[in-house]
């Protein structure tokens, strides 16, 4: 009876599992442990067989994330040589670069074979197909003539190990291997369309596997170009995109990524990879503020502090100097420093439309002391503005050189006390009123919207007076937004704002 009852219970539980389509839940640790157990069992049954041919030196073994240089040859089960990096076996003499467990992964049998090797040790591996190029984690293309369905006989020698602490896998296809030689305290990296200056040498990797141990085929103390302009090869641009100013690094890069450029010559022969030894000297931050090239910001001089933490991204009181030119004629139409260059800086509130939109949007991405060149199409400059300089025609493209002297950093109003929030919301509303009276509807809308959002998020009102004050600000902003919409002849929108004000 006990056996029958147990069987009935098992049947019932199985039915529940089938009905609910239960699946076991695994986290990353469970998956890793399960993989290790399966590998251990496969190795016990001969998935990878290993024998030492030459003893090495030292005690350091490669770890996951380390960059290693190896010489390698692959033979068929019958002993036929299919591929080799050794010069004496008809190879190029250039070792192979691999990052264990990262990037374009090698056959798993190679990684496992390398795990307990030391530098200069040479081993022979016999690898079953499932741990060769057929392994699910292997993304490396097998050499010509190597079958993924047959066991591999591999002769491998570990030449050099570079620590994972200094190694990064970079590039769109994760097949550029970076070794950091000198770190930088900066954090920003160049990208399209930044202008960069870099010291560069290019070399074919040395047979020893030691970076920098071969004669470079190209050396340039200074290369200057614009990212994304097509001047530099893709490998150089992808490498630089991972660097910060004054950083030094060596990159192992696929040869096809550095060929066909006017900036760098092609390598003298056809190795699989080349090494780029780079020192990012400096770069100029260039930003397309509108996404279509109509407002471009080019940094001329670095400021102090860190981007974007030390930028006036929120509406703030700023002090700036600027001078402006008409692009076509070079005519200067404004210079806040004056003829003797001793005038006080201009002080203004951003977000009010006091200055052209191009200046207002770009100065938010500057740090104190920074000087930037701003090039603007007419619609973001003076078209339609009452302060258009005398003699400047509609449609004029302009350029300003702007220096951010200082700004008053705004507090975190979301965390302020209720009275402070209500007061600031009222200040934003008043700023919107000033912009509205001056006919600057876009900044007026922005101020009213920000005031409304802040007043709407005051959840910790303590008194009836606070509730009334917050409600008064919200109602005024809703009515004023209706006035803006009516002035712009958006009558349906104006009605919507009025209805919200009456709720």
Image (tube, grey):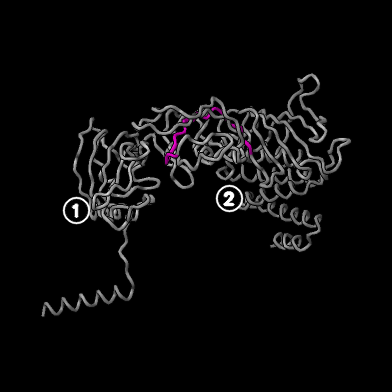
According to the image, label 1 marks what residue?
46
Disc 2 residue crowd, few under 14, some 14–19, many 20+, Cα 10 Å: some
Question: Considering depth in this image, is 106 or 363 the residue closer to the camera?
Answer: 106
Disc 1 residue crowd, few under 14, some 14–19, many 20+, Cα 10 Å: few
The C terminus lies in quadrant: bottom right
Using the rendered image of the protein, determine whether residue 426 is visible from the camera's viewpoint: no
Residue drawn at x 49%, y 38% as measured from the top left = 239
Q: Position of residue 264 (x, y in %)?
A: 54, 34
**Side of 40 where 243 appears, left or right:** right
Q: Secondary structure at mark 2?
A: loop
Residue drawn at x 26%, y 43% as measured from the top left = 155
Which quadrant of the structure image shows residue 226? top right
Picture layout, residue 145 above or below residue 315: below
Q: CA distance from mark 2 to mark 1?
A: 72 Å
The N terminus lies in quadrant: bottom left
Q: Which mark is residue 461?
A: 2
Residues in magenta, as a range? 270-286
Question: Considering depth in this image, is 365 or 98 the residue closer to the camera?
Answer: 98
Q: Residue furthest right?
A: 391
Q: Position of residue 444 (x, y in %)?
A: 74, 47
**Side of 185 where 231 appears, left or right:** right
Q: Secondary structure at mark 1?
A: loop
Q: Position of residue 114 (x, y in %)?
A: 27, 42
């Amino acid at each position: 009876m006990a056996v029958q009852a147990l069987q009935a219970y098992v049947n019932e539980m199985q039915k529940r599992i089938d009905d609910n389509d239960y699946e076991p839940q695994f986290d990353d640790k469970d998956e890793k442990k399960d993989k290790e157990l399966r590998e251990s069992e496969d190795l016990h049954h001969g998935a990878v067989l290993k024998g030492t041919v030459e003893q090495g030196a030292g005690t350091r073994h490669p770890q996951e994330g380390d960059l290693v240089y190896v010489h390698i040859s692959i033979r068929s089960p019958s002993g036929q040589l299919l591929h080799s990096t050794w010069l004496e076996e008809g190879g190029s003499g250039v070792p192979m670069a691999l990052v264990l467990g990262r990037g374009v992964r090698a056959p798993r049998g190679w990684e496992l074979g390398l795990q307990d090797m030391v530098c200069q040790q040479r081993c022979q591996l016999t690898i079953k197909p499932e741990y060769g190029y057929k392994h699910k984690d292997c993304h490396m293309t097998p050499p010509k003539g190597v079958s993924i369905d047959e066991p591999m006989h591999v002769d491998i020698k570990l030449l050099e190990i570079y620590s994972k602490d200094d190694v990064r896998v970079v590039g769109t296809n994760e097949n550029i291997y970076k070794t950091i030689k000198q770190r930088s305290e900066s954090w920003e990296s160049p990208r399209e369309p930044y202008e960069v200056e870099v010291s560069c040498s290019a070399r074919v990797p040395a047979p020893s596997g030691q970076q920098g141990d071969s004669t470079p085929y190209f050396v340039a103390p200074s290369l200057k170009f614009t990212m994304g302009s097509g001047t530099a090869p893709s490998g150089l641009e992808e490498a630089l995109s991972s660097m910060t100013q004054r950083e030094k690094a060596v990159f192992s890069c696929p040869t096809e990524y550095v060929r066909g450029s006017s900036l760098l010559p092609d390598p003298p022969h056809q190795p699989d990879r080349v090494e780029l030894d780079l020192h990012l000297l400096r770069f100029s931050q260039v930003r397309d503020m509108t996404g279509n090239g109509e407002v471009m910001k080019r940094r001329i001089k670095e400021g102090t502090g860190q981007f974007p933490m030390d930028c006036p991204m929120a509406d703030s009181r700023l002090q700036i100097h600027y001078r402006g030119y008409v692009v076509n004629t070079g005519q200067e139409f404004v210079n806040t420093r004056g003829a003797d260059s001793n005038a006080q800086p201009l002080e203004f509130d951003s977000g009010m439309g006091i200055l052209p939109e191009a200046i207002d949007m770009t100065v938010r991405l500057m740090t104190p002391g920074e000087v930037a060149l701003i090039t603007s199409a007419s619609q973001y400059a003076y078209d339609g503005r009452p302060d258009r300089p005398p003699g400047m025609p509609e449609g004029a493209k302009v350029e300003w050189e702007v220096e951010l002297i200082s700004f008053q950093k705004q507090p975190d109003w979301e965390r302020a006390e209720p009275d402070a929030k209500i007061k600031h919301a009222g200040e934003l509303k008043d700023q919107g009123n000033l912009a509205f009276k001056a006919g600057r509807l876009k900044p007026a809308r922005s101020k009213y919207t920000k005031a409304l959002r802040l007043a709407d998020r005051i959840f910790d009102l303590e008194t009836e007076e606070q509730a009334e004050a917050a409600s008064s600000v919200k109602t005024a902003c809703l009515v004023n937004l209706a006035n803006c919409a009516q002035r712009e002849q958006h009558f349906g929108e104006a009605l919507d704002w009025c209805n919200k004000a009456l709720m």
